[in-house]
Image: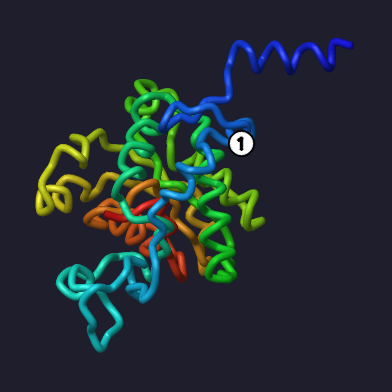
Amino acid sequence: MLNKIIPGLIDLIFPLNCALCGRFDPATKEQPLCRNCLEQIPYTHPPFCLKCGRNIRTYSEQGLCPDCILQPPGFDGAWAFTRYEPPMTNLIRTFKFHNKTSLRKTFTHIARSFIERYSLKLAADMLIPIPVHPVRLRERGYNQSELLAHGLAELTGIPLETHILKKHRLIPRQSDLKRKERWTNIQGAFRIENSSLIKNRHIFLVDDLLTTGATASVAANALKQAGAANVELIALSAA
């Protein structure tokens, strides 16, 4: 009897309303967005830049976007599931700064849809989320990239490692800085622990947002200097 009553009470206390538009939709029982808002997700589409995974709007013989030609990133390749434009801008800010961690279910749904849409065969030795400094972790209570990585680990079966890459230097927030300042700001921010675990390994870094590529590049370089054979990036969204 209680098994039937309790779910009903939960639905009354926590109505099935979309986290984005606020409308009632039973689909939000599985993840926080209604069907209509899910259809508004701006997925990245081909042709993809061979380095950063963004859509190439300007053709180049190298198969790279203008940003990657101008400043090649430290990672060896990337997939970015969506474009950082509405409604992803709102969703990522809410997820990152307003404790809406249930959105990780929506983001796992987005990852699955992208992987199936392009028949991707994602294979690596491990997933490593971009870490946050312990001070930021105490402030926020969670690492958004680690939550995303848990979903990807479930989807792909790739092992998740969270104790190898560490952010040991507290720096000004990258989002508060201009493009050139971000590259300077992030230098030397990461350290590697247990480097023997990554020697000659293929690694997927996981991050919520790819903008200049500075953070992922510096993290990838630290991993490769410690012996990783190949480091690619998986980002939920790219600006």
Residue of label 1 = 27
Q: Relative to the observer, which residue lies in front, 198 or 66? A: 66
User: Which residue sits at x=22%, y=56%?
Assistant: 212
User: Which residue sits at x=44%, y=55%?
Assistant: 205
Measured as percent of width and height from the top left, residue 93 is found at: 32, 34
Q: Relative to the observer, which residue lies in front, 200 or 89? A: 89
User: Which residue sits at x=38%, y=62%?
Assistant: 44
Residue 228 lies, with reference to residue 212, above or below; the image says below
Q: Relative to the observer, which residue lies in front, 27 or 106? A: 27
Q: Amino acid at mark 1?
A: Ala
Residue 79 lies, with reference to residue 4, above or below; the image says below
Query: Taking the image as drawn, is residue 207 in sight?
Result: yes
Q: Relative to the observer, which residue lies in front, 10 or 210? A: 10
Image quarter hosting the N terminus: top right
Query: Taking the image as drawn, is residue 163 in sight?
Result: no
Image quarter hosting the C terminus: bottom left
* Picture quadrant of residue 176: top left
With 116 as the anchor, is 238 left or right in this view? Answer: left
With 218 as the anchor, is 96 left or right in this view? Answer: right
* Picture quadrant of residue 221: bottom left
- Other residues around mark 1 within 10 Å, as few (<14) / some (14–19) / many (≥20): some
Measured as percent of width and height from the top left, residue 45 is found at: 39, 67
User: Which residue sits at x=37%, y=24%?
Assistant: 98
* Picture quadrant of residue 59: bottom left
